[in-house]
Image (cartoon, helix red, strand yellow):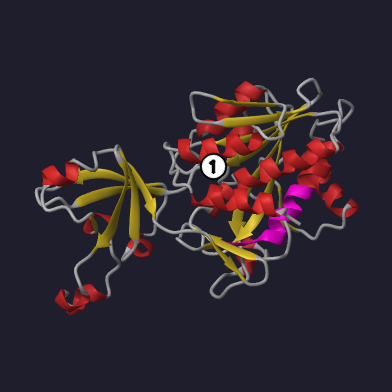
Amino acid sequence: MLSPSSLAFLKRLLDTPAPSGFEGPAARVWREEASTFADRVTTDVAGNSMAEINPGGSPTIMLDGHIDEIGLIVQYIDDDGYIYPSAVGGWDPQVLVGQRIRFLGRGGDVLGVIGKKPIHLMKPSDREQASKLTELWVDIGASSKAEAEGRLAVGDPGVIDSKSIDFPNNMLVSRSIDDRIGAFTVLEALRRYAQNPGPARLVAAATSQEEIAWHGGGALICTNCVNPQVAIVVDVTFATDHPGVEKKEIGDHRIGGGPVLSRGAVVSPVVFELLRAAAERQSIKHSVHAVGRDTGTNADAIHIAREGVATGLVSIPNRYMHSPNELVSLEDVDKTAALIAETCRAITDKTDLTAR
């Protein structure tokens, strides 16, 4: 199970505001923790953070978990001091209605509340219409544009103001599970690998801009820098154990059901089999997700970096994705870290990575 110190680090990481393009605060927390045990910790111009074990080893394996989260950004401030935001990443605007927002202002954090016309003032026909982001504003308690601009500037980022909470049955709720939990898991896997390392050089990477960068974002830059022969991406996937989900379309992946191994499309069949074999050796409960096309994760960019990287994808089941209350099982997180560390120990220079 996760140690008390690892859990404390996880909650600190989850609660640190760091939307795409502004990952610095969470990245600093990640690097601080990595420096307590890694042989080498670095960062780059794209905001990626890397921690390394066995730097002289071979082959090189990269573990990727993106550290950014969805958020908002100040787009316009009107004469009355109201803030009009744009989205950073993919929002359902209904989720934002009535929320509290924490902006990262130049002079410190600025709190605000999402405003919307009260239901009493709506026409009956409007009450059944979905809210649009362009119809919402943020009230920071300013009485004028000048006062608001003294606290915030166009381009300042923000996130929903919420803290992680413990749930029964070893579950955890947070606004930033996607994919701060992946950045945590790759570092936890690196920690466990360090306790009993194999021959490989292992680099855990907390990468930037996944939620906004269809061109590969920080992960593509990081892959070209690390130069791995193998990569394992850790992200979240949709838990299908709640009402309204069609398992026939996306599979059966349950909270507490263990890591989800993706198979097909861009995923290396060799890395998939290495992951499945490690799960079977360690009796780690898991499920398989069939991927017919792209994965919608950093694996899509990593596998075509340079001359190609043998890439696997391991996902953690997540309820209520892109909401203030994403939910995961800490047992799934623990098992995912254990699976990845065990898989990496089995990879040597003699491992044939050629897809056949």
Considering only vertical position in the picture, is 118 above or below 323? below
**Looking at the image, which residue is at 47% across and 44% down?**
211
317 vs 251, nearest the viewer: 317
Considering only vertical position in the picture, is 234 above or below 123? above
| Magenta region | 327-338
Which quarter of the image is occupied by the N terminus? Answer: bottom right
67 vs 351, nearest the viewer: 67
Amino acid type of the residue tagged 1 in the rendering: Ile
**How far across and down, in percent of the image, does residue 267 sit?**
70, 42
127 vs 155, nearest the viewer: 155
Disc 1 designates what residue? 67
Considering only vertical position in the picture, is 332 above or below 118? above
Which quarter of the image is occupied by the C terminus? Answer: top right
235 vs 5, nearest the viewer: 5
Does the magenta run of residues contain 336?
Answer: yes
**Looking at the image, which residue is at 35% across and 64% down?**
94
**Looking at the image, which residue is at 70% across and 65% down?**
256
